[in-house]
Amino acid sequence: MRSTAIDRRTFLTLAGAALLAPDAEAASAEEALFLGARRGSAGFEAAVIDETGRDRLVLPLEARGHSFAIDRAGGRAVAFARAPGRFAVAFPLDGKAEPVAIAAEAGRHFYGHGLFTSDGRLMLATENDYEAARGVTGIYDAGGGFRRIGEFATGGIEPHEALLMPDGKTLCAANGGIQTHPDYERVKLNLATMEPSLAYLDIASGEIVEQVRLAKALHQVSIRHMAIDAFGHVWFGCQHQGDPTERPALVGRHRRGREIEMFTGPEAVLRALDNYVGSVAVDASGTVVATSSPHGGVVAFWDAATGRSLGMRQLADGCGVAGSGKARLIATSGRGAIVETGPEGDGRDLVAPGPATPAWDNHLRRI
């Protein structure tokens, strides 16, 4: 068995020594900043950038990163390793203190996503209890060195992304349904019996208060990433694990107490997504939803109120996307591009791809 554990002292030495101070020109309270994982000339890193694509903070990572938990009020974040990952690192967004390494519990690995509770006291991370083939949410004391203090089950396999609902009391977990085990790297072990779902859990008790599943015909459509729109509804993007010649709907919306709604959009949009949605975000108004596909090289846009397709923009290997101004978003690509985009026109390029530009990973989060 290949060990995926990270030496805690080595990681802290690496991260602490190479944490760069933010730009001397301090960000204003109104300025939008974004956080993403990438591969630069010196290796894997997490980076805070501004709306022009300029670096404000760079933190080296031991291995490939995925996404983040962000405590905006507390000015800190946690970067997670790409699944199956055994490390995470908490760090201040102003770069003025040492990062804190977080090791996965024995028998668990991270799925690359997490969140803070509204009061900032707890950090919750999606995890795999791989011997029992069940998904859990790890609970960490954010004020006590990120010590793991418990967990609760998510009611399915592979809880990938999780979001805090607007009530501040409920967590929504996307159970992707794919069974994996670190001994087998990223091999998918149960494609014939997948059962993806959305599970809503009471944070105080860990009780599942509502759970909805995709139709049986879509059981191989793995729910992966989510965003909450201005109306409090959960939008999600999927990755099809079945016959690649099939073209099932990949974008859905859920309103509490109702069935899941799936949206295909025009045939050209469905075809362009190429059976893979890599990230989901809403613009600042919460009325425009963006779903990216690095496989298809597009970002597709949707009207949050109606589910109507608002078109798409080409972006080669584009995956990271986050809301910027009204009806505008910032998107990043694995080829190094950073663009401003949206349903109204193509927007503008902020950073052009090139041999010296960092290759961005799957997610971009607005701070």
Image (cartoon, grey):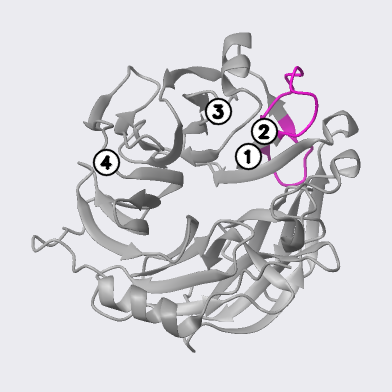
Q: Amino acid at mark 4?
A: Thr
Work out whether 343 lies above or below 157.
Answer: above
Q: Which residue is mark 1?
A: 236
Q: Amino acid at mark 1?
A: Phe
For residue 138: magenta? no
Residue interval drawn in magenta:
240-261
Secondary structure under tag 3 reads loop
Q: Which circle, 3 or 4, is nearer the viewer?
A: 4
Q: Which circle, 2 or 3, is nearer the viewer?
A: 3
Q: Which residue is mark 3?
A: 295
Q: Residue at 33% of width from left, 34% of height from top?
A: 326
Q: Residues within 10 Å of mark 3 (few under 14, many from 20)?
A: some
Instruction: Give the label on residue 252, or none.
Output: 2
Q: Amino acid at mark 2?
A: Gly
**Quadrant assignment, res 259:** top right
Secondary structure under tag 2 reads strand
Q: Residues within 10 Å of mark 4 (few under 14, many from 20)?
A: some
Q: Amino acid at mark 3?
A: His
Is label 1 in contact with label 2 (beta carbons under 8 Å)?
yes
| Mark before the other along the chain sequence, 3 or 4 | 3
Q: Which residue is mark 4?
A: 357
Count of labels shown? 4
Q: Outermost residue toward the top?
A: 267
